Structures are given as structure tokens and as C-alpha cells.
Amino acid sequence: MTLTIEENIWALLKRITVPDSGKDIVSLGMVSGLSLLKREAGLHVAFSLEINPQQKELMEPVRQAAEQALCQLPNITSAAVVMTAHKGAPPARPSPHREKWVIPGVRHIVAIASGKGGVGKSTTALNLAIAMVQNGLKVGILDADIYGPSLPRMLQLNGKPDINKDKKMIPPERFGLAVMSMGFLVAEDAPIIWRGPMVHSAITQLFRDVDWGARDILIVDMPPGTGDAHLTMALQVPLSGSIIISTPQDIALLDARKGLNMFKKVDVPILGIIENMSYFICPHCQERSDIFSHGGARQEAASLGVPFLGEIPLDIAIRQTSDEGVPIVQANIEGKIAVLYRHIADKIWGGLNP
């Protein structure tokens, strides 16, 4: 069986040992924030090598050996290994590649993703989360879109979260939903220009430094694409499943397929596909128009053998209510669209608890 690029990288890193220990840097848990970036000349690999400050001189040859070895792999043209030293940190930790974080009190964690931006992923994730609250569940939502956090604006929440006695952030609540976002920690108009290790650290903080309390489900609004945040999530977060959001047109489905295959490669269950902006009903004449085509996501789900969770229409009220800070599921609880979201939310919960 042919190994993937990622598998080849991890296999190579397992052959790089720490002097005087006889153990490799992977089994010692020293590799974090591994990322693969596409560049014109080829692939660039980057990760952090977490060390004890007293090991700096000892580990420099190891760092150099890792960079040189990675550049010998096919299609990899450059590598950057950065040593990060934490005062008092032990020289060995459980490997993030093998062990998942434990999020106390959280029963299920579900990632909501898309292969591309502009398909309404965050709006769908938020309305589904509120729909689950309305269905009687204890729900949290994490805005893991490090580069473009949008949940604070969509819920009209601002300010930094409170800190409890254990020095963990307390997520603010809105409509019965516990919410955490990088948007609470940085200015709304501040550009976030981070590389792999920094993204890894940010996501670590949003998961491990938050007191989520008892939650039936934690919805994670993923950034679009398949980048550093997705890799960290796949390797370290105990995901119960993932959901792909797509619009009906072919180009969106092509990108959605990439996102779906990414989760499959890292053994995260696919709970289903949702077709957003599926159709448009004219508010004046009630005529239906399939602006972005129709049914493509259903067909894609059938061809890939994964559940099709439902269709959400293109409706101006969804946009308006999100802009006003009261998403449509809450703004019009008995409306047709709210009923659609609650029905899909019920399907998702059923997929987690068959």
C-alpha cells in the first residue's frame, strides 16, 4: 500500500532520535503543529519541536537533522523546524499524533466544515447549534476559524471572557448556547497572520483553556479548506464526527469532496452533507428558482455513501437575522426555516446516538 505524504513524514520523524535517550522525537511527544503548505516549487513542511530549555544545545543538531531529512522526501522542497522551549517543561510528553485531548464534560464534538469559503458554513453551524438547544440539548459552539472569526458578530457578543479560579476561560452564553471564539481575544479589525505552530497553539487554547461545563455536544465551526487548523483538529481532538456544507454547483461540490476525503483519511466519521442555498423562493410571487442548480449535494452524498442531511434555501431572512445578531432559528422559532434546521439537528443527534 502506498503511503501518503503525511504518513511518510511521520515515518521519517520517527527515525530521528534524541541523543542519550534512544527514543525518537515523535514517541517523546516533541512534534507539534505539523503543517503542509503548497508552494509553486513544491511542498513546504513546518512544525515545532518542543524542548526543555536546558536541552537547547543538545537539540539543535536534531532540529537540523529533521529539516535536512524532510527535504529528501519526494515533492518536499523546503522545511522549517522551530524549537519552542517552555520553562520547567519535561523533556518527554505523550505524542499528540497518538493521543487525543480529553475535553471534560463534553459528550460529543462535531466539526462542521466546507472545502471552500462563501457557502454559508458559519451561518449553518450557528443555526444548527441553536436548533439543538431548542431540541433540548446542552450545546457549545467553538469558532475555530482562526483567520476570520465571525460568531461574535453574528451573536452580538463582545469583550474578553471571564476567567474562573482554575484560570480557564468561561464561555459567554447567548440563546442557551455556550460560545468561544478567537474573536473574543483579538480586535475585530486586527489581521491574523499566523503560521502552523501558532495556529496549533491558538486552537489548543480554545479547547483546553476553556471551561465548557457539561455539554451534550460541542459544535466546531471550522475554517474553510483543509489547512493547519484541520490537521490539529484531526490529530488531537476526539471528534465524534464531521459534517460538510456545500452549495449545489459543481465547483463547490468538488471542494466539498476534498474536505470530506480529508476527514476520511484521518478516520473521522462523516455524519453527512448539507446542501445550503439549495433553492430560492421569490418573496413576492412565490416562484422557485434554483440559482446555484439543485440536488448536487444529495447526489454527491449518494455517490460517496454518506448521509444526506437536508436542504437549506437561499433566503434573505437568514442573512438579515445573522447580521442583526439573532439567527433565524431564534428570530422566527416557528418559521419553516427554523423547522428545517431543527429537523437536520435531530438527524445529526440521531447519527451520533443510533
Image: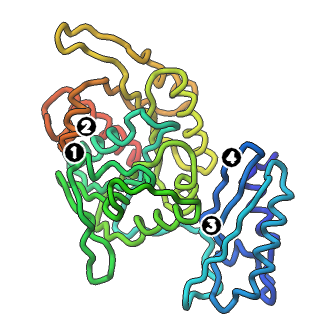
Residue at figure coordinates x 46%, y 65% from the top left: 202
Residue at mark 1 to residue at mark 2: CA–CA distance: 7 Å
At label 3, the amino acid type is Arg
Mark with earlier residue (4, 3): 4
Residue at mark 1 to residue at mark 4: CA–CA distance: 42 Å
Q: Position of residue 83 (x, y in %)?
A: 66, 76
Residue beneath label 2, please?
342
Depicted 143 relative to depicted 336: above or below: below
Tell me if label 2 and label 4 are in contact, CB under 8 Å.
Answer: no
Which mark is drawn over residue 34? Answer: none
Label 4 element class: strand
Residue beneath label 1, please?
135
Residue at mark 2 to residue at mark 4: CA–CA distance: 39 Å
Residue at mark 3 to residue at mark 1: CA–CA distance: 35 Å
Q: Quadrant of the C terminus?
A: top left
User: Which class describes the residues within 10 Å of circle 2: few (<14), some (14-19), or many (20+)?
Assistant: many
Depicted 266 relative to depicted 194: above or below: above
**In the displayed structure, does residue 72 sit left or right of residue 207?**
right
Mark with earlier residue (2, 4): 4
**In the displayed structure, does residue 110 sit left or right of residue 46?**
left
